[in-house]
Image (cartoon, rainbow, N blue to C red):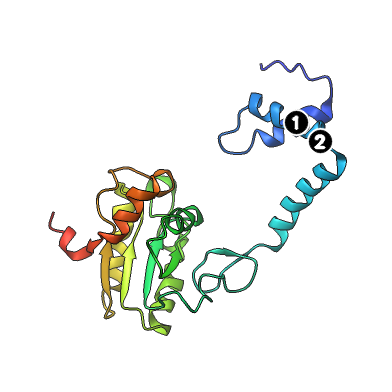
Amino acid sequence: MELHNYSSHLLEKAVNEFAKLPGIGKKTALRLVLHLLNQDEADVSNFGESIIQLKKEIKHCKKCNNISDTEICNICTNPNRAGNIICVVESIRDVMAIENTHQFNGLYHVLGGIISPMDGIGPNDLSIDLLEKSILENKIEEIIFALPTTMEGDTTNFYLFKKLNKYEVTFSVIARGVAIGDELEYIDEITLGRSIVARSVYENTLSQ
């Protein structure tokens, strides 16, 4: 049985809530809670209200599934972006990672995951229908697969290719300068940027 040395049930409750966050253990959670206790009440209130407001008001873009303050995100509504190319990514974090490279000026589509039978995630759990809708409604000329270089990522690439290959679209995949097994959000900006620029035709990779 785990021993608790908290002098306050309120403190323990707060620590337990912080410890539910990914990558946050009990010691880190305690340090964060004690830090908040030392802040002005107004600052702590602003912190709590920002999280509550985020949960209540955040939206998913109706075109690309990215997070947004409005129905359509500012990337999709930006007239300076190339509207004929879509970069398919697993998560919102990948959009941020690619944007930081300043090497891509097209649109995105956030799948919300990748196909992983071990985790109980199938094609129906992803926003694939929304991607197909974008292809149908817009003059999309190229789809870039920028999914993790893992077995699950490759499986998802292949599924999307087989499902969407009926459309007159060029399919490409980011260069394998990204090491096998890497998650995009952890790759340095220069390597990720080069992998976008040096992308290759997807069909050519199937025979490798």
Q: Amino acid at mark 1?
A: His
Residues at circles 1 and 2 in contact by the CB criterion of under 8 Å: yes
Figure quadrant of the C terminus: bottom left
Which of the 4 image quarters holds residue 23? Answer: top right
Say which element carries label 1: helix
Label 1 CA crowd tier, 10 Å (few <14, some 14–19, many 20+): few
Quick one: 158 or 36, which is closer to the camera? 36
* Horizontal and vertical percent position of residue 79: 49, 79
Q: Is residue 148 visible?
A: no
Question: Mark on residue 138?
Answer: none
Whether 57 is drawn above or below 71: the answer is: above
Horizontally, is 4 left or right of 112 in the view? right
Residue visible at 28% across and 43% down?
Answer: 179
Figure quadrant of the N terminus: top right
Residue visible at 37% across and 83% down?
Answer: 139
Q: Is residue 207 visible?
A: yes
Q: Amino acid at mark 2?
A: Gln
Whether 10 is drawn above or below 170: the answer is: above
* Horizontal and vertical percent position of residue 168: 26, 81
Residue visible at 28% across and 77% down?
Answer: 169
* Horizontal and vertical percent position of residue 171: 26, 69
Say which element carries label 2: loop
* Horizontal and vertical percent position of residue 199: 26, 60
Whether 190 is drawn above or below 86: the answer is: above
Horizontally, is 59 left or right of 185 in the view? right
Residue visible at 49% across and 55% down?
Answer: 96
Which of the 4 image quarters holds residue 70? Answer: bottom right
Horizontally, is 173 left or right of 54 in the view? left
Residue carrying label 2:
39
In three-dimensional space, the C-alpha distance between marks 1 and 2, rounded to whole angstroms, equals 7 Å
Residue carrying label 1:
35
